[in-house]
Image: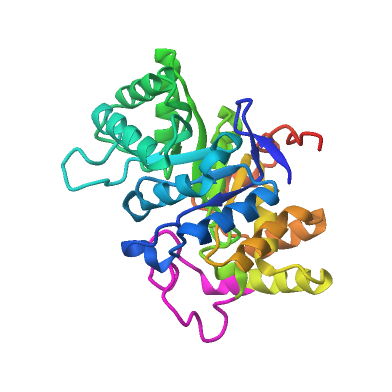
Amino acid sequence: MEYRLLGRTGLKVSAFAFGTVTFGGEGYFAVLGNATGETAKRQIDICLDAGVNLFDTSNYYSMGRSEEVLGEALGKRRADVVVATKAGLAAGQGVNDLGTSRRHLIEACEASLRRLKTDWIDLYQMHVQDPLTPAEETVRALEDLVRSGKVRYIGCSNYSGWFTMKSLAAADRLGVTRFSSQQIQYSLLCRDAENELLPLGVDQGVGAMIYSPTASGYLSGKYRGAGPSEPTRLSGGSALQSIDEAQGARVLAAMDEIAAARPGVSLSQIALNWVVRQAGVSAVIVGARTEDQLADNLGAASWSLTDEEIAALNAASAVVHPYPYNFQQQDQRFPAPRLQPPITPAA
């Protein structure tokens, strides 16, 4: 497993992280998975054996049940890993049970600590931008949590580029802790992050934690032909993933050629390998409903795409970006800066 620095911090995280949105399985999230008890522990074991040290959850996943299951599954191994959770989406029915106000964040953090059965959260990310709360209030509240020792690093998720920059500027102006991460959607079929979010992250030292790297499973190839036979995030019409079928066909064809030349390599591994090679990416979050799926996804850490294969996938997934990004991309004299090489601790 390769380890990378989280943004511009000294925290080393595995290039592939495990997302526990499949833990708990309550409400809408039952569509994604329902791992609990021994099943969850076995998945954690598989991840740890593969070198994964970063585990992602949220107080929103299964209304907090995901955090509970993760805390139970980690047990005494808690100190050996990096736990990331999130707040901001609705955690209750009250008018103050969402957003990034001081009141909600402090209450949400305390509740997450109880569910995770831990004294600290390694990475606390804002799950959604809250334009109703001043950025200064949010970053000051997060600073208080950092100073109290309950939180060690902070980040954002699903923010617009301008709102991320606004939050970073507020932190700099107040002299408080800045965001070290941004958890964002990115894949061969969703390259919008290349317009603002990834360049911002490279420039400002905000490491990207990528979710949905296989485009909600589409890039595994399982939806070809008749499509999914059971409910999934993709079949449910999630707003997080809209597939252009023509682009999807081009990408899958390019992936098929690579897979044919690499016996034993799955399409999912190819999709994950492409994402992990992109500038600004600190970690790629993988998930799975079964142990076989998890083992296959983590197999992406054992090999790398060649530059030629990367170029073929880039060409197949290329899209015309909107203005002003299309104008900027015509001028190659100003390439986006790349992060320094990742750090891989000696075995």
Residue positioned 56% across, 74% down in the render: 246
In the displayed structure, would residue 4 be above or below residue 255? above
Tell me, yes or no, whether the highlighted magenta stretch contains residue 264: no
- Quarter holding the C terminus is top right
Q: Nearer the viewer, residue 77 or 124?
A: 77
Q: Position of residue 321 (x, y in %)?
A: 53, 53
Image side of residue 343 versus residue 104, left or right: right
Image side of residue 335 versus residue 167, left or right: right
Tell me, yes or no, whether the highlighted magenta stretch contains residue 243: yes
Image side of residue 345 versus residue 116, left or right: right
Number of numbered discs present?
0
Residue 286 seen in this snapshot = no
Q: Position of residue 154 (x, y in %)?
A: 46, 30
- Among all residues in the image, which is located at the extreme bottom? 226
Residue positioned 67% across, 57% down in the render: 298
Q: Nearer the viewer, residue 226 or 290?
A: 290
Residue 262 seen in this snapshot = yes
| Colour mapping used in the image | rainbow
Q: Quadrant of residue 337?
A: top right
Q: Position of residue 139 (x, y in %)?
A: 37, 24
In the displayed structure, would residue 33 be above or below residue 347? below
In the displayed structure, would residue 91 be above or below residue 179? below
Give the residues in magenta: 222-249
Q: Magenta stretch: dominant SS? A: loop
Q: Quadrant of residue 145?
A: top left
Residue positioned 40% across, 20% down in the render: 143
Q: Position of residue 302 (x, y in %)?
A: 77, 55
